[in-house]
Amino acid sequence: QPASDRSSTSNLKKHAEACWGKDVVKARLTGASASNSPRDGNIFASFARTGQRPVKVSHRAHTEPEFRELLLAGRPEHHIPSRRTIGRDLNAAFDRCSQRIVNLLDNYNGRLSFATDAWTSPNHRAFVAWTVHLQHEGQPLVFLLDVFEVPEV
């Protein structure tokens, strides 16, 4: 690569325009938000700690407009599904996978090895896990069958 071309970003700009369109790239270069929000739109502003306040840790970050805007930075055409949609999709995927594992184990002609593991979490709660180990078409497989909390004695 020629030394004069090392700091050039024209190819990156052309690629971004091909992927997201000239209007989105222009909006990003000027610091405007693609969502026409009144905020600055600068990605660095998303990480700034206003007034040097402590960092807020949230388990619901996906519901905050600032976080959603950060996720969509550079890809404004994408859609972030709701928490209910994700929960429903996860449950459906879990049901499908569970049924496939049940069918595989029911029809398996070889040996199955079962194992348990127990541990204590940092908040002093005891858990036990059950796994099954097998070889399917020459590949070792491990399935987590169950995890449960051990009740206090």
Image: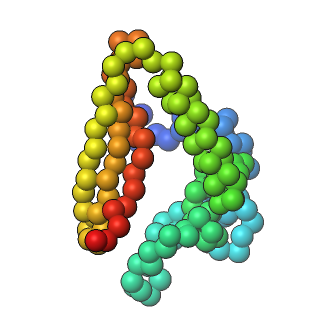
Find residue 143 and report its horizontal and vertical position in percent. 40, 35
**Residue plotted at (34% across, 25% down):** 112
Q: Quadrant of residue 63?
A: bottom right
Q: Quadrant of residue 66?
A: bottom right
Task: Tell me the colour scheme of the image.
Answer: rainbow
Residue 65 in sight here = yes
Q: Compare residues 87 and 141 and report the one nearer the observer.
A: 141
**Residue plotted at (30% across, 28% down):** 113
Q: Quadrant of residue 5?
A: top left
Find residue 148 and report its horizontal and vertical position in percent. 39, 56
Q: Is residue 36 left or right of residue 142?
A: right
> Which image quarter holds the N terminus?
top left
**Residue plotted at (31% across, 34% down):** 114
Vertical order, 99 against 63 (above or below): above
Residue extending farthest to the front is 153
Total marks shown come to: 0
Q: Compare residues 48 and 72 and report the one nearer the observer.
A: 72
Vertical order, 104 against 68 (above or below): above
> Which image quarter holds the C terminus?
bottom left
Q: Is residue 123 left or right of residue 28?
A: left
Find residue 13 and report its horizontal and vertical position in percent. 58, 41
Vertical order, 85 against 120 (above or below): above
Residue 76 in sight here = no
**Residue plotted at (55% across, 25% down):** 103
Find residue 59 and report its horizontal and vertical position in percent. 50, 70
Vertical order, 76 against 49 (above or below): above
Q: Compare residues 43 and 109 and report the one nearer the observer.
A: 109
Q: Compare residues 72 and 109 and report the one nearer the observer.
A: 109
Q: Is residue 52 left or right of residue 14?
A: left
